[in-house]
Image (tube, grey):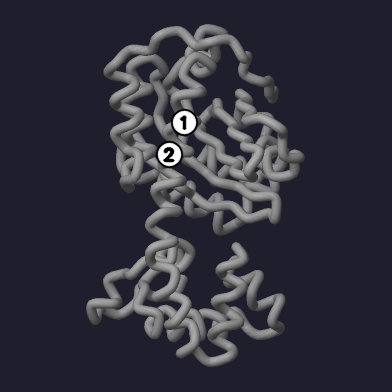
Amino acid sequence: MKRWPVGGADPPLLAANVVSGVLAGVGTTQLAASYLVAMHRVLPVTFCTVFAANAAGGIETVSAASSYGHTAERTAERYVAERFDLLDPHMAWLAARALPKRPQLWIAHHVATEVADAAYRAACYTDVGIRERASVLLLMPTGQRAAVSFYRSLAQPDFDREDFRRLETHAQLLADATMAHGRSAAARHDAAEPLLASRLLALSLREREVVGHLLAGRTAKEAARAIGIELTTVRTHQYRAFRRLGIRTLKELLRGTNGPAAQGEPPAPAR
């Protein structure tokens, strides 16, 4: 397990098809998929995930993609739901690190056998056929923290020095694209936030309390513990609140967007 800063030297010219491929997903739901396809030209991998962290301890899946099926997406959902980020040395380091005076980029690497927690190791590595992960860690003076990670399966060769050199070469491109994607999401959130705020007034006090915990980055289980009620009760309040707000998923709540429920569809079942 290791982590090192990306050097400040001017990066070499990058292949046009890699640059255009990475940028193709900015502002769309296909961010990780675009990274996976574009980087595969220089760094063959199986999964790609993009996570955002904050100093308050929150974690969010920005995007995830697999070279086959939807395994990366399901694994990322479990990673966030079970707070495996708290057991992930690189993500814990990123969330706790003091804000720098200028943007920082780091490369991080570990293999499955270095993951101490058995449940985390099984869920995110061995059970899905992943042997190791290499990441670009981004830390901004304004507080943004993100990790763009690439995973190799048991069938692929180990990451070697040349692979790390290629990842360092493309680190700034991946960081710039991830920041641009974040700005795009923030713009959409700001446009929709007043409408969401007005809808919050229609909720009951308990529904608002539950939504407040979810907006703070807590899981339903953590909200139940903080409020002192059963998890099933929290799920009921969450379902009712989402229906009144016209949204279907937690991601829509966090982004303040109008979901399908605004057009009369019921919210997705609570999980």
Relative vertical location of residue 253 with respect to residue 89 in this rendering, above or below = below
| Residue drawn at point x = 64 percent, y = 50 percent | 54
Q: Is residue 130 positioned above or below 86 on the image?
A: above
Image point 74% across, 44% down: which residue? Answer: 96
Any part of residue 109 in sight: no
Q: Position of residue 14 (x, y in %)?
A: 38, 12
Residue 121 position within the rendered picture, expressed as x and y whole percent measured from the top left: 61, 40
Given the image, on which type of amino acid does mark 2 rest?
Answer: Ala
Seen at 37% across and 31% down, the residue is: 35
> As drawn, is 124 to the left or to the right of 249?
right
Foreground residue, 196 or 82? 196
Kindly check if marks 2 and 1 are in contact, taking CB atoms under 8 A apart as contact: yes
Position of residue 101 measured from the top left corner of the image (x, y, whole percent): 71, 32
- Return the residue at label 1: 176
Give the residue pinned by disc 2: 180
SS of the residue at dot 1?
A: helix
Q: How many marks?
A: 2
Residue 138 visible in the snapshot: yes
